[in-house]
Amino acid sequence: MGTLSVIVITRNEENNLKDCLGSVRWADEIVVVDSGSEDRTVEIAHQYTQKVYMRPWEGYAAAKNFALQQCSCKWVLWLDADERLTENLAIEIQAVIANEDTLPVAFEFPRKAFFLGRWIKHCGWYPGYVVRLFQREVGAFSLSKVHERLDVKGPIGRLQHDLLHYTDPNLWHYFDKFNRYTTLAAEGLTEERARFRLSQLTVRPFWVFVRMYVIKRGFLDGLEGFILSVLSSCYVFTKYAKLWELTMRNKRSNA
């Protein structure tokens, strides 16, 4: 029978972690990697596992790859602290890892986001399939500064039930992430030697709004869908504005 390790990285997640870990408390092993929480995150983590590691922040991918190295089970499930399994998804995962003849080495499943108090069912956010369950020997995390992905060697299957994502309970929380993520994204583009183009500020943000609100029917998600579409457009604008700023700074320093 297959066994399951769950990995979660944290920093100041006391409001989310109990529900997250509670939804996977049936797993054989839970690994939590914390990067300097100043609240009760570590205390809460110890209520569910003894495998809690405190490490300086080196980036999302580095933290997750470290967590992966601490796992001992055949299968690994990675979650963000603001995510949790539904009961049906938990049952589906347990059935998959119990089947020794399973062909796929990884599985994706739909993720449903709770944004400003509303489940977002359009905007291109749902079903929003994410690869989260994989065999430990065939997976590793990319080294992207933000929105790192899981690289898997082998076929990927699909499960049916939702992963729940309690992403942004309020706009303060959204903008707290907004500044950090746009900076990391711009730095990542700079390291990849991406070139700044004016269309990245004029065309791309407008297209993001049209795609999310009109083509992906974000208008069906009410005012929250409109706000999400506008903010996503602003995210793209800000990311490329920061790319421009870094590009100009590098030119001046090399002049």
Image (cartoon, rainbow, N blue to C red):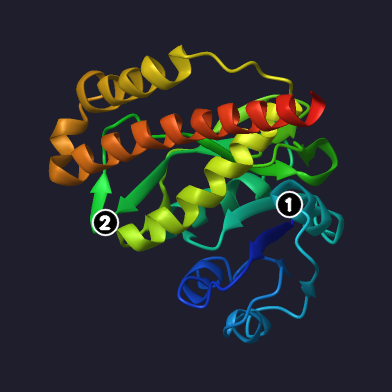
> Along the line of sight, which residue is nearer the eye, 38 or 215?
38
Q: Amino acid at mark 1?
A: Gly
| Residue 177 position (above or below residue 181) | below
Q: Is residue 87 visible?
A: yes
x, y percent for residue 110 = 43, 39
Q: Report the residue at 40% width, 61% height from top.
A: 173
| Element assignment for label 1 | loop
Which residue in the protein does label 1 denote? 59
Instruction: Report the side of 190 relative to 169 (left or right).
Output: right
Q: Report the residue at 58% width, 43% height from top.
A: 183
| Residue 252 position (above or below residue 68) | above
Instruction: Report the side of 232 relative to 192 (left or right).
Output: left
Q: Are marks 2 and 1 in contact (CB under 8 Å)?
A: no
Which residue in the protein does label 2 denote? 116
x, y percent for residue 43 = 64, 87
> Along the line of sight, which residue is nearer the eye, 98 or 238?
238
Instruction: Report the side of 200 relative to 187 (left or right).
Output: left
Q: Is residue 125 visible?
A: no
x, y percent for residue 119 = 26, 50
Q: Amino acid at mark 2?
A: Leu
Q: Earlier in the sequence, mark 2 or mark 1?
A: 1
| Element assignment for label 2 | loop
